[in-house]
Amino acid sequence: MEVGLRLAVSVFELITVVVLGGSLNGLKERNQLIDNQTAAGFSAEASLVKCTLHGTPRQPAFSKDGDFVIGGAFFLHLQMHTAINNYTTKTKLPRCKGSFSARALRFSRTMIFAIEEINNSTKLLPGVRLGYQIFDTCASVLVATQVASQLLNGQDTVFYEENNCSKSGKVIAAVGDSGSTPSISISRIFRSFDVPLVSYFATCACLSDKKQFPTFFRTIPSDHYQADALAKLVKHFGWTWIGAVHSDSDYGNNGIASFLDSALREGICVEYIESFYRTDSRNKIRTVADAIRRSTAIVVVAFTAEGDMRVLLEELNQQPPPPRQWIGSEGWITDPHLMSFSFCAGAIGVAIQQAVIPGLKNFLLDLSPSEVAASSVLTEFWEDAFNCSLKNTADLNNRECDGTEDIKALKSLYTETSQLRVTNMVYKAVYAIAHAIHNAVCQETNTTTKCDKHMHLEPKQVSIKLKKVNFYQNGYHVSFDANGDSVAFYELVNWQQSDNGVTELVTVGYYDASLPKGQEFRVNRNLTWMAGGKQVPASVCSESCSPGTRKVLQKGKPICCYDCIPCPEGEITNITDSLDCFPCPREFWPNAANNACFPKPVEFLSYEEILPTTLAAFSVSGACLAIITAVVFFHHRTTPIVRANNSELSFLLLFSLTLCFLCSLTFIGAPSEWSCMLRHTAFGTTFVLCISCILGKTIVVLMAFKATLPDSNAMKWFGPKQQRMTVVSFTFIQVIICTVWLVMSPPFPMKNLTTYKDKIILECALGSAVGFWAVLGYIGLLAVFCFVLAVLARKLPDNFNEAKMITFSMLIFCAVWITFIPAYISSPGKFTVAVEIFAILASSFGLILCIFAPKCFIILFQPEKNTKKYLMNKN
C-alpha cells in the first residue's frame, strides 16, 4: 500500500513539475527522500518539499489575508482547457472553461460568509481573523493536484533552496473538494504534511480508510450509509429486479460497489450495470441509454454525479424516453436543472438534510458592482447570469451591462436558498475547522476567552483537534467519528409534479443511521411514482410464488428469476417465495392449495354409511331368519321331517348360525381393544360350532345308512351322546387356538397410515398373523372334512337325503372362503373389513338356505310330504 502511495505522490509531483515548470532534479531528490523515509518522518521534510515544488502560482478565485488561512477547492467550472506543448515555449497552466456553475459559486461564497461570520464572532476565535484562499479545480484531478501544491506553498513566487521558505498565505486546513476523485488526490498530497482536508461533498466510502487518508474529514455522510439507505429503499417497495448506472469515477465506482453489497444482502438482483462519464463519446452514452431501453427492469438506480446524469438524461430524451422509476443518489437527486426532464417525474432518492442558514441569502445578494468587477469569477457569473458584458469591448452577441441588472430578481442556483443542503455541509466544514483552531490557540477562563493569534500553529495540531470537535451550529450537530465521517442522516425525497406541471422536490421520509437496526428507514408521506402514478410500480424478474408453491431457479439467471412449482404430494408451504416445501405430520394432509395441513379424515365402517348399514341389515335379517327357522322347527318338532333330521343338532346349528350372523356386527364401528379381540374370536368359535354341527349331521346320515345293513351296530357308536361330544370337542379346539392367540399376541386397534396417503384407516391389526390364519385354517379343515363326508353320502337311497343339502351348503361355504382369501388381501382400507363381513354373511346364508330352506318349504307348503310313509319310500 505504501509503495502505491509513494508512486501516486510521485506522479502528482511529476505532473506539477511539468506543468508548473518545477525542477526535475528537485523531483528526483524528492523521490529519493520518499523511498528512504518512514511514516513518522513525513512531516520532517515538509518545508523542503514545499520549496522545491514552487513555480508560477495559480491565482485563487477568492482570497483574503488573515491570522490563519483556510483553503478552499470548488468546481466553479466543469471542464479544463489544456494547451498542447511543443517544447519550444514555456508551458502554461491549464485553465478552466465550459459552463459556469452558479451552484458551486454559492458553495464558495458560503465559505466566505461563514469565515466573515466567525471573524465577527465574540465567542469563537475572538480577536483572531481567518483568511481564505479559494481555488477553482474545474472538476479536474490535474488542476486539483496543482491547487493542493498551491495551498501547501502559499502565494510566494520566489524559489527557495533552503528550508526557510516564506509562509505568506500558507493554509493550515482546507475545505473541499466537490468530488471524491479530486478529494482523493488532494488528500493524498496533504497527508504527507498533516494538513487536514474537510470535504463537504466527497462521499466515496474509500475516503474513510484512515491508513490512506489520515487527515481527511467530511461533514457529508459516507456513501457506505447512502448505499445502505438506497438498498433499503428499493427493498421497502418490493423491487427485486433493477438496473444500475453509475459514474465512471471514484464516487460512482465505489458507491455502486457498496450499493451492490447492500442489495445482495437485501435479496435484490441487478439486471445490468452500466458505467459512463460525462466526457465519454456519444456512442458510449448511447450504449448506456440503449441498455436502459432494452431492459425489463422498471427501476433504475443511478449512482452518478449531477453532470454525468445530465448527459445521460439528454441522450434518453432524444427518443421517446422509456418509462422508468428512477432511484437517485444525493449526487443528482436535488439538482433543480435535472428536474426539467419531465419523464423523470416520480424519481426517489436520498438527499442531504435541509438546513437554514440565517443571513446567507442577504450575503449572497449583496454584490456591489465594484466587487463584481474586481473578481474575474464574479464577473463571469454576472455576465453569464444577465447575458451581458462588463468589459468595454463587449461581445457582439451580448449587450453591455448598464447597471439595471437586479440580482435580487435573478432566478439562479446561486440565489436559490430555499433548500440548502450541500451548502450547509460547506458551512459546517468551515465551522469545524474554526472550532479546531479555537481549541488549539484559545484558552478558556471562567469569564473570558483569550486567543493567541501569533501562535505558531501547525496543520497537524488542527488535524488532532478536528478529531475531537463536538458542537452544534444553527441546531445541527457537528462531530467526526474515528474514520473522520459525520453521523449519517438523509432525507428521502420525491420528484412530484404540481398542478401546473412543475416538478418539485418533496421530502417524504428519512434515513438515520444512528437509530437501532431495523428502525433507520421511515417513509411518512405519500409518494408519486413514474408517469404520475399513485400505485407502486412492480419491478420483479418473476412474480412471487404464492403459498403452496416453491421457487426453482431458472438456469443461468440471477436468484430473482425463478419458476413457481407446486409442492409435491403431502408437502406444503404457507409462506410466499418459499425455497422448500415441508411435509405435513403423519396424521395430517395438505389442503387443495397445499398451503396448510389438516387432520386426515378417519375412515372405518360406520353405521352412518350405506355399505355398513346394508351389511348390518343383512346380518340382523339372517339372525332373524335363523330364529324363525328354529321357531318353525320347534313348532313342528313332532313331525317326521324334523325328527328324521336329528332335531337336537338342527337346533344347535340354528343357534350357531344366529351367532354367525350376529358376530358380523362386531366388525362395524370404530375399532377398540375389546371389539378387535371379540370380532375374530367370536367369528372363529361360532363358525367352528356351526361346522361341527353340520359335520355331526353328516356323520349321523352315514351312520344311519350303515345301521340299515344286516349285523350293523353303527348307531351304537354314534348316538346322541357321541354327537354332543363331537361338537364340543371340535369347538373346544378352536377355543384353545383363540385363547393362545389372545394371550400371545391379540388383535388391537391401529391407525393405518400407509394404505392411503390422504386419510387414516381405523382397523384391527391381527396381532399375530399365525393366530388369525390358524383360526381360518381350522375352520377350513373342518369344512373340507365335512364336504368330503357329504359327498360320500349324497347318493344314499333315501327319498329325502339331507347329505345332498349339506354337500351344496359346504360347496358354497368353501367357495366363499376360498374367494375370500385373495379378496381380503387385496381390498384396501375399510373394504377389507367389508369383505370379511360379506364372507361371513354369504357363507351363513348359504348354510341356512341349503340345509333348512327345503325342509321349511315342505313343512309350511307341502305338509303331505311331511309323513313317515313319504320319507321311507325309496327312489
Image (cartoon, rainbow, N blue to C red):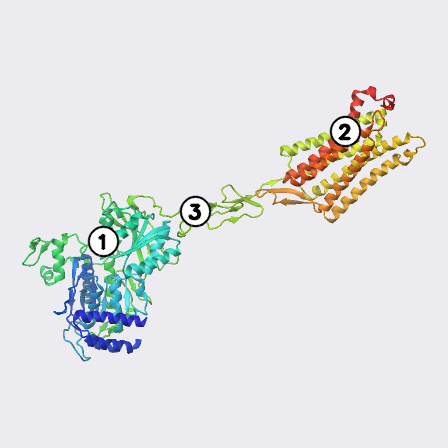
Q: Nearer the viewer, residue 193 or 48?
A: 48
Q: Quadrant of the C terminus?
A: top right
Give left or right: position of 835 versus 347.
right
Which numbered dot is residue 850? 2
Give left or right: position of 508 versus 265.
left
Which numbered dot is residue 282? 1
Q: Which of the two labelled residues, at mark 2 and mark 1, occupies the earlier sequence position?
A: 1
Across and down, in percent, residue 545 comes to 44, 46
Question: Residue 81, located in which quarter of the rendered image?
Answer: bottom left
Across and down, in percent, residue 793 comes to 83, 31
Calculate the distance from the C-alpha at mark 2 to the C-alpha at mark 1: 107 Å
Residue at image position (13%, 60%) is 378
Give left or right: position of 380 versus 785.
left
Residue at image position (15%, 52%) is 410
Q: Secondary structure at mark 1?
A: helix
Across and down, in percent, residue 401 comes to 7, 55
Question: Residue 734, located in which quarter of the rendered image?
Answer: top right
Q: Foreground mark, 3 or 1?
A: 1
